[in-house]
Amino acid sequence: MTFLLVRSELNPDGAGLRAVPVEHVMKLLFQHEQVSDLRIYSGTKPIGYLHLHPHVDRTNDQRVMDFTGTMHVYSTPEQRHRVSWDGNLFFNEKGEIQKTAWSVTLDDPGYVHIAVTAVSGAPTAHLVVHSRERVGGEVQERIVDERDIPMDEAGFAGLMKQVGGTGDVAGMLQQPAAKIQPVVRARLSSLKFRGENLETYLVSVEHNGQVYLEGHFSQLGVVLQAKTLLGYTLRTEE
């Protein structure tokens, strides 16, 4: 494999990491279609999980990343919110996102379901907000807002103010909708995993000079570990 031909010994502080094409790592994901199941940690405390499944739609050769997950976030030390999400990312052959369709549900207390569909390069994203209310003894879900919103921070800040979301949730919502495309880099690296030193691809997502996400991928495209700007760590348990 190309990876084995260009591998190198890395020193502890990460110097000497070799850049590799992001397209190569993306190709591994959709070639092997391996599932990644990750536990989310805040410090050493487990607070949720994330499930990723890259696959190719055989009907149109579209590369799709399915994702689902849930976690608990705190607006105050006493106030906890349960947040869950699911969706799909659609990529072209170069690994560039062409379309996103995802939703976030804020629950406990209250209920708000936010669904967003966005196409790469479009100035707006389509938003649908649902809530629940009790009618005649039955709980029914209804649309409380549906509109197009600007693909920028101001558009999502207004949305979060409307639904009462926390700062953590606002950050998660804004990241996929940035008008300025993030910079994605891939490098050769290594990770100590279950007592073994594994050779990995270290992929980082940067925006406005900040690293939003950094993850170690195995040679089969499985996510082994990741760190986020929000301070959360994700690790596989397999």
Image (tube, helix red, strand yellow):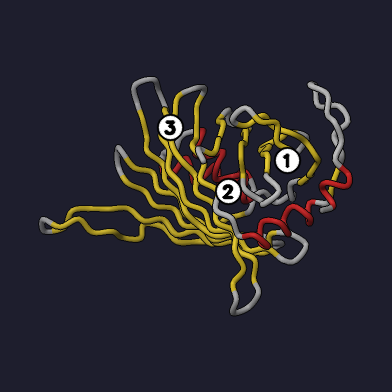
Q: Residue at x 79, y 55 (%)?
A: 24
Inter-mark Cα distance, 2 to 1: 37 Å
Q: Secondary structure at mark 3?
A: strand
Confirm or deny contact between disc 2 and disc 1 (CB under 8 A): no
Quadrant of the rendered image containing residue 162? top left
Q: Nearer the viewer, mark 1 or mark 3?
A: 1
Task: Answer whether residue 206 is visible to the viewer in this image.
Answer: no
Residue 149 in the image, given as x and y percentages of width and height? 56, 56
Residue 199 in the image, given as x and y percentages of width and height? 74, 38
Q: Say which amino acid is labelled 3.
A: Ile
Residue under pointer 3: 47
Q: Camera-side residue: 78 or 165?
A: 78
Q: Residue at x 67, y 29 (%)?
A: 192
Q: Say which amino acid is labelled 2.
A: Gly
Which of the marked residues, 2 or 1, is nearer the chain's N terminus? Answer: 2
Q: Nearer the viewer, mark 2 or mark 3?
A: 3
Which of the marked residues, 2 or 3, is nearer the chain's N terminus? Answer: 3
Residue placed farthest to the front in the image?
196
> Which mark identifies residue 200?
1
Quadrant of the rendered image containing residue 217? top right
Classify residue 20 as left or right of residue 93: right
Classify residue 1 as left or right of residue 37: right
How crowded pointer 2 is (Cα within 10 Å; few <14, some 14-19, many 20+) is rated as: some
How crowded pointer 1 is (Cα within 10 Å; few <14, some 14-19, many 20+) is rated as: many
Q: Say which amino acid is labelled 1.
A: Thr
Q: Secondary structure at mark 1?
A: strand
Which of the marked residues, 1 or 3, is nearer the chain's N terminus? Answer: 3
Residue 88 in the image, given as x and y percentages of width and height? 55, 60
Residue 8 in the image, given as x and y percentages of width and height? 87, 35
Residue under pointer 2: 155
Classify residue 92 as left or right of residue 8: left
